[in-house]
Amino acid sequence: MGFPTFNRFIEPILRYLAAHPDGVAAADAHEAAAKTLGLTEEDRQILLRSGAQPVYKNRAGWAHDRLKRAGLSSSPSWGIWKITPKGQRLVNDHPVKLPDDVAETIASSFVDRSLEELNTIRADSSISAEEKTQAISIASPEERLESALDEIRGAVTAEILDLLSRVSPGYFETIVLDVLHRMGYGTSRADVQRVGGSGDGGIDGVISLDRLGLEKVYVQAKRWQSVVGRPEVQGFFGALAGQRANKGVFITTSSFTPQALEFAKSVERMVLVDGNRLAQLMIDHEVGVASRAIRLPRIDSDYFSE
């Protein structure tokens, strides 16, 4: 039959989580799914082509990613998987086996795609699950690779935001300054200083753009769950005025209201960075994120020109 694809791990993991509603270690869920799917010890030794991880653990992880995106499970803490009330209701409604269309929806939906064609295919309710699979499978290798990379980036972005929501406000300020330094602000890390604390006047960090400190960027970092409104952004602008500063960056883990964005546009040299953009910057500049290069071969037609 071949090695089970990631979508076949979805139901075993969901049912294992339902049997342990208080949450389980991810490693235990990996093993439970492997046992349910009949994987041998030899199967479990098979690694990804990169050698980075056993295939079954990788596929179990992606299966859980789909369950989380569908709102059927959660990760209340690092390495712990837990079923949600929605997930428990789904299992209760289907005590023996999930209908094929439900399993397909969990496996193929709730994923942001960059390719317009794949978006159209997946959103078209007139196309059957089998036809969708066939349509997507005939996409070119380049399209499939791009789609896969976007999916991985989306999953990492979500995980970054989840982790940022759990760090202390002080450490979040340090992370923000690390990102700005990696982006090229400050001649050295010593030029990027955290000053947040009681009485900080709304300023959490200062970046010297030159060695003499004649030009500076002031930073405010807010680890918030709720959206940031105009009063907070306007207060930061007032703090900048108090420092006689003309450059400021306001970074949050959440998002900004339209009024806050409009205010920032109305003043000069203030930049707002929301949680999604911050996560993208952390990926691009490898702050708390590790990347690996993928070598894609293609023919050098000039070499074969006689």
Image (tube, rainbow, N blue to C red):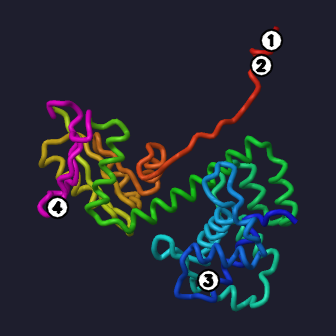
3D distance between C-alphas at marks 3 and 4: 41 Å
3D distance between C-alphas at marks 1 and 4: 66 Å
Q: Earlier in the sequence, mark 2 or mark 4?
A: 4
The residue singled out by tag 4 in the image is: 197
CB under 8 Å between discs 2 and 4: no
Element type at mark 2? loop
For the point 59% across and 88% down, the residue is: 20
Element type at mark 4? loop
Q: Residue 120, how many percent across, how many down?
A: 75, 55
Q: Earlier in the sequence, mark 3 or mark 4?
A: 3
The crowding category of the residue bearing disc 1, from other C-alpha atoms within 10 Å (few below 14, some 14 to 19, many at least 20), is few
3D distance between C-alphas at marks 3 and 1: 59 Å
180 lies above or below 9: above
Query: Which label belongs to residue 61?
Result: none
The residue singled out by tag 2 in the image is: 301
The residue singled out by tag 1 in the image is: 305
Q: Amino acid at mark 4?
A: Gly
Q: Earlier in the sequence, mark 1 or mark 4?
A: 4
CB under 8 Å between discs 2 and 1: yes
The crowding category of the residue bearing disc 4, from other C-alpha atoms within 10 Å (few below 14, some 14 to 19, many at least 20), is few
